[in-house]
Image (cartoon, rainbow, N blue to C red):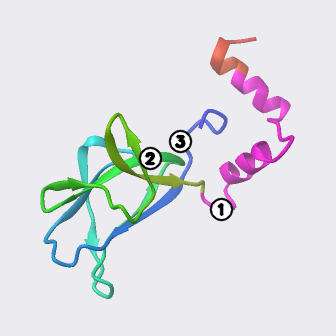
Amino acid sequence: DMLSGNMGSGHVHIAIKKPKAKMVETAGLDVGWHERIPLVKDAKTGDFVLDRETPPGVYQYKFIVDGEWMADPELPSVTDNGNVNNLARVNPTPGSPDAERRARIMRKGGLPTEEEWQRLRVMLVGSV
């Protein structure tokens, strides 16, 4: 994020129940639609899962199950330009400076500090 000077860190966990599938991947998230990330089959549940560090934000994604692109109707989804995609909200790591800053700014009446305002002004309009 702009105030931290980097993308921040969060964690995404997605899973899909496809017990007969041989291979499950996902596209979208923070890597885009042309990259695929393989999911791992959980030996206990049989679900295909993905756990990875991801910058905070809201991401669209789809599963690719044995080559077939699909959204899981059991998970949050959005229709974007006629395509149904699943939706993942990634929050900052709890207790991190990013999480504390976001909580402070997002609460009712919350504002950036004077230093944060100054940093934003410099980034948006150049030196002040």
Q: SS class of the residue under badge 2?
A: strand
Q: Quadrant of the C terminus?
A: top right
Residue in the image at 40% along x and 46% along y: 60
Residue with the mark numbered 3: 7
| Kind of residue at badge 1 | Pro
| Kind of residue at badge 3 | Met
Residue 85 highlighted magenta (yes or no) = no
Residue with the mark numbered 1: 94
Q: Main secondary structure of the magenta part?
A: helix
| Kind of residue at badge 2 | Tyr
> Which dot marks residue 59?
2
Residue in the image at 42% along x and 62% along y: 75
Q: CA distance from mark 3 to mark 1?
A: 15 Å
Nearest to viewer (mark 2 / mark 3)? 2
Q: CA distance from mark 1 to mark 2?
A: 19 Å
Cβ atoms under marks 2 and 3 closer than 8 Å: no
In the displayed structure, 34 sits above or below 127; it is: below
Q: Quadrant of the N terminus?
A: top right
In the rendered image, residue 55, in percent from the top left (x then y), is placed at 50, 48
In the rendered image, residue 111, in percent from the top left (x then y), is placed at 82, 36
Question: Earlier along the polypeptide chain: callout 1 or callout 2?
Answer: 2
> Which dot marks residue 34?
none
Tell me which segment is drawn in magenta: 93-120
In the rendered image, residue 89, in percent from the top left (x then y), is placed at 52, 53
Residue in front for this viewpoint, 16 or 116: 16
